[in-house]
Image: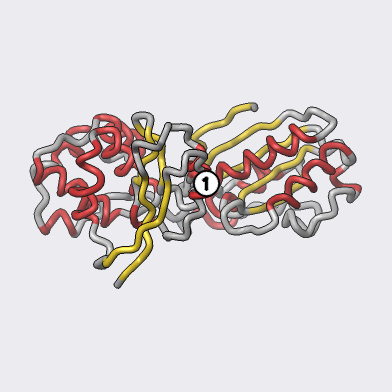
Amino acid sequence: MKRNIITIDEERCDGCGACTNGCPEGALQLIDGKARLVGDLLCDGLGACIGTCPRGAISIEQREAEPYNEALVMRTNIIPKGENTILAHLEHLYHHGESAYLRTAMDVLAEEGIPIPQGFVKLMALKEGDTTNAQVQHRQTQHNQEQHNEPMIKGFRPVSSEAGPAAEQPSALTHWPIQLHLINPRAPHFNRSNLLLAADCTAFSLGNFHSQWLKGKTLVIGCPKLDEGIERYIEKLILLIDESKVDTITVLRMHVPCCGGLVAIAQQARNQAKRNVPIKAVTVNAEGTILQEEWL
């Protein structure tokens, strides 16, 4: 079958990084001063990133393609570009929960005699309590079938049913609707409130979403990847800042690159508003771990 794939002219690319924000799937990253396609499996070939490149370095090519082959991608696209691209690709697979592809990628490194980047060794040691540096490095010499039956990523641990009623939390939601397209930014409940601007997925990732993040705040939600009419989002946030005079905005986003668009929307609204409001960006991963908190 033929499918579309993004291709990058490295001679034209000046490393501005604009395309990394224009790739909803997070398949593009800036590495060693050049834009790199680090995740073929997430490139849909629609070319959303093309219009963001001021140098015309991104285009689409159509080629006869077999079903996705991680080993082939590693050998032809990732390994030749060096250690930093290898590290970015392994992290890319890890954070998207692609455990089978990650095992294959590490097997290819072992077969080619290429060390696993220390940055990834440290990541695994930090993220997996039962994975030591030695265990990760051991992957390079033992990539047999028995290991293929053992999951590499052990995240997404369900809450024990023994937690019982104590695990239940009351809702902290005080108003409706909450989708940014549907809300009235002049509604009285927003007046001088602390606003939580949350990406759709965050409430499902954080077990304490209501008690820790929503309590005492008003809420609007959105998805910068799937939602249309982002300009309208900015307009409504400007009204929330200028007319409803929200005191603060907390942007709760997922760790994937496309979710960074939610932070950009909030910053654009503040830049265009008459008032200056404090914005706090909080990044969470799919396992509910807070990766970063910062005031912007």
Coordinates of residue 179 in the picture (x, y in percent): 72, 57
Quadrant hosting residue 272: top right
Coordinates of residue 264 in the picture (x, y in percent): 63, 39
Asked whether residue 92 is in view, the answer is: no
15 w.r.t. 168: above or below: above
Q: Is residue 207 left or right of residue 240?
A: left
Q: Nearer the viewer, residue 270 or 149?
A: 270
Q: Is residue 214 left or right of residue 38?
A: right
Coordinates of residue 3 in the picture (x, y in percent): 35, 66
45 w.r.t. 140: above or below: below
Q: How is the image coloured?
A: secondary structure
Asked whether residue 63 is in view, the answer is: yes
Specify the farthest residue to the bottom.
1
Tell me the element at label 1.
loop
Quadrant hosting residue 116: top left
Question: Which amino acid type is shown beneath numbered disc 1?
Answer: Gly
Coordinates of residue 174 in the picture (x, y in percent): 80, 52
Q: Quadrant of the C terminus?
A: top right
Q: Which residue is mark 1?
A: 22
Q: Nearer the viewer, residue 190 or 113?
A: 113
Q: Is residue 103 left or right of residue 18?
A: left
Q: Quadrant of the N terminus?
A: bottom left
Q: Residue at x 78, y 59 (%)?
A: 182
Q: Nearer the viewer, residue 40 or 219?
A: 40
Q: Residue at x 36, y 43 (%)?
A: 9
